Amino acid sequence: PGVPELRTAIAAHQKQRYGLAYDPDREVLVTAGATEAIAASLLALVEPGDEVVALEPYYDSYAASIAMAGGTRIPVTLRPHEETREGVTHRRFRLDLDELRDAVTDNTRLLLVNTPHNPTGTVLTREELGEIAKLAVERDLLVITDEVYEHLVFDEAEHLPLASFPGMRERTVTIGSAGKTFSFTGWKVGWVTGTPDLVTAVRSAKQFLTYVASGPFQYAVAEALALPDTYFAAFRADMLAKRDVLAAGLTEAGFKVFQPAGTYFITTDIRPLGESDGFAFCRALPERAGVVAIPNAVFYDHREAGAPFVRFAFCKRTEVLEEAAKRLKAAW
């Protein structure tokens, strides 16, 4: 289940930041990264034939884990939205709540939610999360919520745990990650919080995946979770500055930029560059500009919906981002 020191630190983190009280012995489980947490949660809670409603585009392990559990993936697509306020154009990907409601059937077992959202950088609003919560309660659905980018929210955006909404604590499995919170990529320390019944179910699947992992690193993560708020504020500020460097460079190069409210990814529309096929664009990009991007279509069931979008990452040194922006501008 994880060393007691880390489980206690995770429970304290959830209580201090979100007012969510969890018993570290019965309601917290440490996993081999968030990817194992996702797999174990789906294997534990989904039976063959169950439908899982997931927001698309989605992290690629979702599809594989749902398939391994024998479930059927029902995607609900986040749609690009643009509005102008006070002369400034704002772009984001937005959840169509009616489409979400229509996706739920009598066979739906579970909602799989991700906020802050990879790859679009969207942070679901209080209204959107409130409607998700109402739907889950009305239809008696379980929810797995992937909140690994919880500490990377920018501007006026606010991360609100779905488990904090009325009626949600008892039906929600929340997933967190040391790799995303502390840039400990490769340490593979993630966690799950939920009710004793939910955590016991996830643990029963997890123990046959890795059994135990990252033992020495768990003590370090426990110490890190106790860091003062100044650490998290500095982490956000650093990533915000890097976001702005890359976003400005991409805009100057001619991309249509969807300014992310969270995560460390920027989604762009390549159509202003005269391109429309993200796969072809990303294959040619390294040779043309010496820069690498990911076609968003790989994160979609409905690939045509993601065809003109590509994702860049700004979790790099500032000088690398500046050089990338320079190369992209020179290439177009």
Image (cartoon, rainbow, N blue to C red):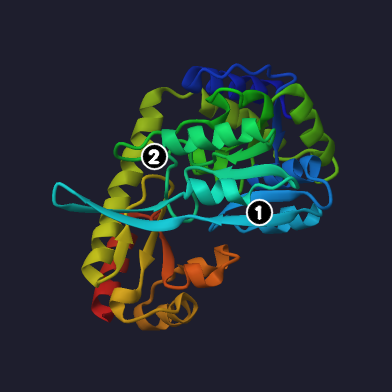
- Residue 217 appears anywhere in the view: no
In this rendering, would 124 be left or right of 137? left
Q: Using the rendered view, name the quadrant where residue 20 is placed.
A: top right
Callout 1, which amino acid?
Answer: Tyr
Task: Describe the element under mark 2 as helix, strand or loop.
Answer: loop
Nearer to the camera, 22 or 228: 22
Quadrant of the drawing holding the N terminus: top right
Residue at 84% from the left image edge and 51% from the top image edge: 48
Local packing at callout 1 (Cα closer than 10 Å; few below 14, some 14-19, many 20+) is some
Q: Residue furthest left?
A: 87
On screen, residue 41 above or below 2: below
- Residue topped by disc 2: 153
- Report the residue at 51% width, 48% height from top: 98
User: Residue 240 vs residue 65: left or right?
Assistant: left
Kind of element beneath mark 1: helix
At which x and y percent is residue 162?
A: 54, 32
From the viewer's perspective, is residue 141 above or below residue 320? Answer: above
Image coordinates of residue 85 in percent, x first then y, are 19, 47
At 81% from the left edge and 53% from the top edge, which residue is drawn? 49
Residue highlighted by disc 1: 62
126 sits left or right of 99 in the view: left
Amino acid type at mark 2: Val
Vertical placement of residue 303 versus 209, above or below? below
- Sequence-wise, which precedes: disc 2 or disc 1? 1
Q: Residues within 10 Å of mark 2 (few under 14, many from 20)?
A: many
